[in-house]
Amino acid sequence: KAGVTQTPRYLIKTRGQQVTLSCSPISGHRSVSWYQQTPGQGLQFLFEYFSETQRNKGNFPGRFSGRQFSNSRSEMNVSTLELGDSALYLCASSLGDLETQYFGPGTRLLVL
Amino acid sequence: KQEVTQIPAALSVPEGENLVLNCSFTDSAIYNLQWFRQDPGKGLTSLLLIQSSQREQTSGRLNASLDKSSGRSTLYIAASQPGDSATYLCAVSLGGADGLTFGKGTHLIIQP
């Protein structure tokens, strides 16, 4: 069974631009969560989707948004990029609540 | 607000030793606790998931325990190997759509 895949793996953008990251969950998984990892803050929860509905969002500004499609694939978008948005963005999928979360390899975003 | 602390932040031991990594959390109302490992520049690999009703879980040379009332978990690694070198992360879930709350991790080096 294929794992969680994320595209692209690496991305370089400049301040003010916007970016879209994609995540394909493990087949059959309906819950997709996104996390931001930085050296200073560690791993922080961005948002969680289940059956195309955002059920929860972490403490991030409105520039961070996402969506989930009917096939459970998810995208996250960051608008008006700032230098501090440079991070590893990780996506995780699970069968549902209280189940093991499986993480993808991440997308490394560098904002110049 | 849930906070997760991992001690020690870094650990270096010779190959073959048994070792214990510690994780503590401030809110004991968790639904489960998960241990992950992360290799440099990579995503997270799930090691063990302990539900709140469980006391421990085992997988191969790994054993994780959970004392929910005291807000503590330990990850025991038996007969350590150089391939165990990685950052080990502890994460707790409050259930439902809430994302995982992570500790900052323990950076483990196993010396050949």
Image (cartoon, helix red, strand yellow):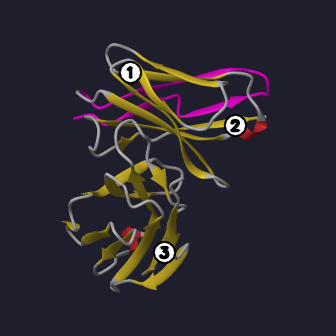
Indicate yes or no whether the magenta region holds residue B18.
no
Q: CA distance from mark 3 to mark 2?
A: 29 Å
Q: Which quadrant of the view contains residue A104?
A: top left
Residue denoted by label 2: A85
Tell me which amino acid carries mark 1: Arg
In the rendered structure, which amino acid carries the disc numbered 3?
Ile
What label sits on residue A7 in the rendered view? Answer: none
- In this image, A15 relative to B85: left or right? right
Measured in 3D between alpha carbons, the distance from the residue under mark 2 to the one under mark 1, in whole angstroms, is: 23 Å
Residue that carries the numbered disc 1 in the rendered image: A73
Residue annotated with mark 3: B109
How far across and how far down the image is residue B7, in percent? 51, 74
The type of residue carrying mark 2 is Asp
Q: Is residue B88 above or below residue A27?
A: below
Magenta range: A1-27
Q: What chain does mark 1 sit on? A: A
Quadrant where the C terminus of chain A sits is top right
Subunit of label 3: B
Which element is circle 3 on? strand
Is A19 part of what is drawn in magenta? yes
